[in-house]
């Protein structure tokens, strides 16, 4: 059964200031709410202990939840793994999670230590001094974790646009220069408008479509802004985002438009085809817009692209031959 991987978003990491402000606020509210008919010194001790406990707990809960709610980035299917690795340094994220876990443990120790020390004091001034010390030490512990929180916050932002795709479904990726007719082919094969999923490095996202032939389901992906210009114009991170598609694509349909209407000459399109062949192993060449070609041009193109399939996404010509290919 094909499995759709909804990439679980990382939780948002707060800044030390946000975290401390929230913790101080909760702590004083909790202490104010404490009512007891006891000696003033006993009440003072109860209040200060409550402030330390609530302050510590608020911070620890947030930090622990941050760690447990972060999905494992190393146990992902290859497509997601490579994509994630293109976007963030997985090792840094792992180290920061470990450090945040450690921070929560240190705060737990500080909480216990200061509450213990409160028991031994006998003056009102003494109780507030111990609470201030606890606040100070816990605050600086949180601030020391500042870089780690920043790393997690940044990772959350960078991984926010990971697309959700069926990772085990037979998948066709369509490539080729803009305006050659990729989206029109997707519409024709699926009989519907593509769904758009976000994809890092392209503001246009991925166009996703699904169709069935026999008992088999297929996923078809059009990648506007991605597989439509030479790879040498890409930065390394973009190349990795493209390479991630290798794990997803069972076949790449490379579409060429020899009609002269897409705005890119045929030579240039053939050059991109060579590029794509370096990255993807299973490439089917499709010549589109045959409805615009005369016989002479068809023969010329046949000479240049021996194994190509000639279609017209607009009229439907050649689509049955394309659908016969087994993937
Ligand atoms: N005549 C003709 N026009 C086509 C064909 N396929 C696509 N087009 C037109 O080419 C333009 C670009 O098509 P589109 O699917 O958006 O290309 P994409 O940028 O590669 O996704 C549109 O105006 C389509 O109507 C075809 O087979 N024949
Ligand atoms: Mg398109």
Image (cartoon, rainbow, N blue to C red):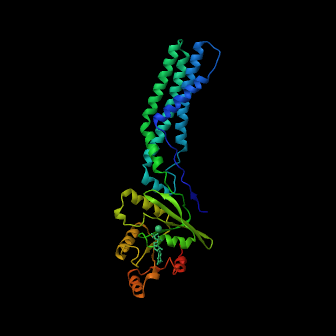
Image quadrant assignment for residue 272: bottom left
- The residue shown at (54%, 76%) is 323
**In the displayed structure, would residue 105 be above or below residue 195?**
above
Closer to us: 161 or 116 = 161
x, y percent for residue 262:
41, 73
Taking depth in this image into account, of 260 and 72 the one nearest to the observer is 260
- One can see residue 131 in this view: yes
Task: From the viewer's perspective, tell me whether residue 72 is left or right of residue 234.
Answer: right
Expressed as whole percent of the image width and height from the top left, the position of residue 70 reads 52, 45
Asked if residue 252 can be seen in this view, the reply is no
Name the residue rendered at 50%, 77% in the picture.
314
Question: Compared with residue 267, is residue 114 higher up or lower down, i.e. above or below?
Answer: above
Which quarter of the picture shows residue 180?
Answer: bottom left
Q: Quadrant of residue 29?
A: top right
**Quadrant for the N terminus in the image:** bottom right
Seen in the picture, residue 182 relative to 294 is either above or below; the reply is above
């Amino acid at each position: 059964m094909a499995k759709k991987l909804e990439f679980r978003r990382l939780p948002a990491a707060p800044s030390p200031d946000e975290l401390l402000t929230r913790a101080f606020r909760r702590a004083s509210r909790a202490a104010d709410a404490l009512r007891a008919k006891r000696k003033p010194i006993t009440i003072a001790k109860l209040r200060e202990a409550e402030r330390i406990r609530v302050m510590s707990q608020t911070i620890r809960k947030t930090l622990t939840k941050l760690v447990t709610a972060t999905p494992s980035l190393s146990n992902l299917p290859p497509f997601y793994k490579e994509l994630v690795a293109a976007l963030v340094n997985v090792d840094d994220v792992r180290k920061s999670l470990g450090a945040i876990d450690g921070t929560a443990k240190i705060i737990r120790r500080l909480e216990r230590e200061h509450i213990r020390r409160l028991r031994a004091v006998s003056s009102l001034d003494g109780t507030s001094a111990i609470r201030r010390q606890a606040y100070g030490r816990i605050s600086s512990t949180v601030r020391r974790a500042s870089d780690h929180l920043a790393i997690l916050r940044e990772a959350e932002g960078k991984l926010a646009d990971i697309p959700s795709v069926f990772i085990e479904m037979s998948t066709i990726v369509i490539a080729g220069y803009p305006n050659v007719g990729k989206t029109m082919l997707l519409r024709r094969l699926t009989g519907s408008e593509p769904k758009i999923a976000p994809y890092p490095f392209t503001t246009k996202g991925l166009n996703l479509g699904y169709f069935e032939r026999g008992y088999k389901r297929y996923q078809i992906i059009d990648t506007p802004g991605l597989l439509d210009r030479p790879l040498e114009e890409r930065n390394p991170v973009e190349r990795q985002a493209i390479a991630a598609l290798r794990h997803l694509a069972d076949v790449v349909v490379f579409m060429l438009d020899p009609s002269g209407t897409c705005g890119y000459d045929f030579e240039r399109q053939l050059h991109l085809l060579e590029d794509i062949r370096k990255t993807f192993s299973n490439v089917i060449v499709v010549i589109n817009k045959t409805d615009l070609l005369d016989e002479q041009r068809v023969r010329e193109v046949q000479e240049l692209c021996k194994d190509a399939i000639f279609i017209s996404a607009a009229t439907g010509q050649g689509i049955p031959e394309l659908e016969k290919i087994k993937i």
